[in-house]
Image (cartoon, rainbow, N blue to C red):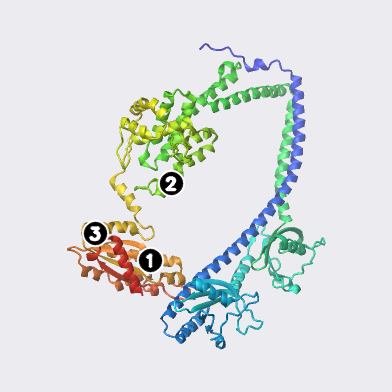
Amino acid sequence: MSKKRLISMPLVMIGIPTVVGIIFMLLIALAWYFSARHSYLSDVDKLKSIYVENAKVYVKSTIDSLVKQIDLDVKLTLKNIKNRDFVYLESVVRKLKKARSINEMKNILQTATFSSQLDFYLFDGKGVCLYNPFNSKIEGISLLFLKDKNNQYPIRQIISNAKHQQEGVLKQLWPYNWHFIDDWGRVGFSYYFAMDNGLIVVARRDIAPIFYRLKRKWIKQLSVFRFGMFGHGYIFVAKLNYNNPDCFLEEIVNPNRPSMVGKCLDINKKDIKGFAYRKKYVEDITKKDFSFVEYYFKLPKTDKIKKKLSYLRLYRRWGWIVGTGIYFTDLDELVSQKEKELHNQFRLIELTIALSILSSLALVAGFAIFLNKFLYKKIKGIFSNFEQSLSKEKMIDLEKIKIEQIYYVASRLNDVIRKFKEHENELLEVFVNILEARDIYTKGHSQRVAFYAKRIAQALGIDKDRQLMIYKAGLLHDIGKIGIPDNILLKPGRLTSSEYEIIKYHPVLSYEILKRIKRFEKLADFVRHHHEKCDGSGYPDGLKCEEICLEARILVIADIFDALTTTRPYRKAFSPQKAIEILEDETVDKKILYRVKDVLIEAFDEAEADEVEIMSEKVDALRSEISRIDYMTGVLFITALVEKIRKLIERKRKFIAFGVNIKNTSLINYKFSAETGNEVITKTSAVLQSIAKQKNGFVGRVYADKFIVVFELNGDANVEDIKRLFSAEEIKKSIKKEFLIESDCKIKNSRGECISDYIDLEIVSVVSDTIETAEKLIYLIDRKLKTSKA
C-alpha cells in the first residue's frame, strides 16, 4: 500500500481569525458563569427538599421496623407457649389414661394445675363438669348453657370441636369464679383433648400475663433506643384507652421526659405556634394507622424548643402509638455542610471562569480554544465510528481520513478492535473453562460444541458474522449450569425425575444471563433452544422444528454429537460414524444433518484432543460415600443402611441388629432447647459409632431419634459377646459422661436441672435368623421399640 500524503493539523488551523476566537471564548465564559450560578441556587433548594424527604423515609422505616419486630415477637412467643402447653397437656393425658377412677384423675389434674401455669378441668361428652380446681360446687352440672359477654358458648364450642378433632386450641373468654354473674374473666387459650373413654380434658392459660411480660420487655428496650448522628432520635410510646375518656391517651415511654411516663396526655395540647399536634396524629392514626406531623417540641436534655418532624404508627393489638422524630436543627446541620461544599464548588467555577476570560484576551488562547474545538469534533467523529465498528466487529475505514493526527488515532483504534476480538474469545473460553471445572465429566464440551457448530454453519454457507455468533453461542450455551446446585450437577449416581427437571432449567438460566448483556443479547434465543426437538418433545418451551431458529437447530446437532463422541462415567465414547447413526434416529433437523454428516466426521478428527479424565476410584468412592452420610450425626442415611443390610442378607451372613431409641427428646427440647436435643442426638451417635468400630459394625439413622447398629456374626464376634458390648447402662453412662466435666454438668436449664438426668435409652435387638429383607428388620425393631416403650 502506497503511503498517503496527509494534511498537518497546524496547516488546517492557520486560517482561523483570532478575533472570532476571542469573542467566542467570552460568550462561552459568560454563559458558563450564569449557568453555574443558576445551578448552584437550584441545587441548594433541592438539597433541603431531599433531606426532608429522606428524613421522612428514615423515621418511617425506623418505626415500621420496630412495630414489625414487636408483632413478630408476640406471634413467636404465643406460638412457643402453645407448643409447650400442648406438650405438657399430652404428658398429663398420658397419666390420666393410666388412672383407674375419676378421683384418681382429679388428683392428677389438681397436681398439674398447681404445679404449672395451666388450669385443668374435666368434662364428659355432654358438657357436664366432672372436675373444677377452683369451684367444686359446679361439678356434676352441665355448662353447655354458659355464655361469655360476646354471646358465645365456650364449653359448647369445646365439646363440639372435640367430637370432630381429638385435640386443639381455642381463643376464648371464660368466667373466673363460675357464678356467671358479671364475671367474664380474661382472654386466654383453651386447650382440649378428647380421650378414648369419652372424657374431655381442658387446660386454660390466660394471655394477659404473657402480654404483660412482653409489654414490659419492649417498654424497657424502647426506653433506651437511640438513633441519629447527634443522638437526638428516641422512641416515644403512648397508649390509647378507648374505654377511658378521662385518660384517652397515656404516656408509657418518653426518654426525653421520663417524668411523664404513666401520666395522661392532654389530646388538645398545642405547641408554641398554637398547633394541636396530638389531636392531629390521633385523627390520622384512627383513619389510617399512621401519621406524619410537624410541630415544635423541646430538644432532648435542653429547654430549647425546636421544630420537629415525627412519624407515629398504631400497633392495634396493644393499642400502642409508637413514634419517633427528627429535629430540623439536625437537618439544618447536614444541609449546611452540604451547602458549604456546593458553595466551594461554585467559587472554584468562578475562579476558573475568571482565569479563562483573562486568557481569552490573548490571541494564542483564542487560537488554542478554537483548535481544541475542531480537534474535539474530529476525534468525537472517529470515536463514534469506533463504537459502530466495535459493535459490528469491523475495522474503521482509514481511506476516508485525510488528517494525519486523526489517521494515527484511527489506526490505533483499529488495533484495539483487533485485540478486543482476540481477547474476547480468549476470555469467553477461560470463563467456560472455569465453569466446566465444576464438572470434570464435561471438560472441553463447550469449546467442542462451538467448534462443531461453526463448521456446520460454514458448510451451510452462512456468512462469517453469523458464524462468529454461532461460535460464541456454542461457548456460552451451558452458562446457565452455574445456577444448578452442586448436589444435583455433580451427583455421582442417577438423577431422580425431580432432579432432572431442575437440570432442564439450565437453558432458561443461560437465556436470562445472556439477554441482560447487550453484547450477547442476540445469542440468548440460540442457547435457550439448544435442547428443543423437532417433534416438540424438547425443553424448555417444547418447540417444533419450524419454530426453532436455525442457529439453535445447529447447536442441537453439535451438542448431541459431542455428547456421543466423548467418554462419560456411564459409557465409553462412540465413534463419530456411530454418533451420526444415532443422530439420524434423533428428532433433530434431518435436512441440516444430511448436509453436514461428512463435515462432522472430518471436524471430529480436527478437533483438539481433550479426553475427559475419569475421576479416580478413590475420589469417586469418597464423593459417593459423602452422599450416603447423615450430615448431622455422621452415620448412614436410612437408604444407605438398607443397602448394606441387603448385602449381608444376599451373602447369607448372620448378624445381629440393635434398635436404639433416645427417650425424652421432646421433653429435653421443651425443658432445655432444641439445640440441646440435637446435641444429645449427636453425642449418642458418636458413642454408638465408637462401639460399632470395636466389632466392625455399622450405624444408621432411621428416624430423628432412632438408630440401628448392625454387627456381623463371625468367629471374632458372637451374639453373647456383642450383647455384653452393647449394654444399655454402659451406653447411657458413656453418653452422660459427654455432658460432664469433672462431675460438673455442662448444660443446665433455668431450674438448675442437668441434662444428664433426662438422658435415657430404649434398646432392643433382632438376630438375622428370621430376616428375609432389610425392610422387615427395620419394621421388627421399630415394633419392639414401641412395645418396650408401652
Left or right: 248 in relation to 164: right
The image quadrant where one finds the C terminus is: bottom left
- Of marks 2 and 1, the one in the foreground: 2
Residue type at numbered disc 2? Glu
**Which disc, if any, is residue 705?**
1
> To which residue does mark 3 refer?
649
Q: CA distance from mark 3 to mark 1?
A: 26 Å
Q: Which SS class for mark 1?
A: loop
Between 251 and 79, the residue placed more toward the observer is 79
Residue 324 vs 38, above or below: the answer is below
Q: Position of residue 680 (x, y in %)?
A: 39, 67
Instruction: Give the label, 3 or 1, closer to the camera.
Output: 3
Kindly identify which numbered label has been placed on residue 575. Answer: none
Label annotation for residue 501: 2
Element class at badge 3: helix
Q: Residue furthest bottom?
A: 137
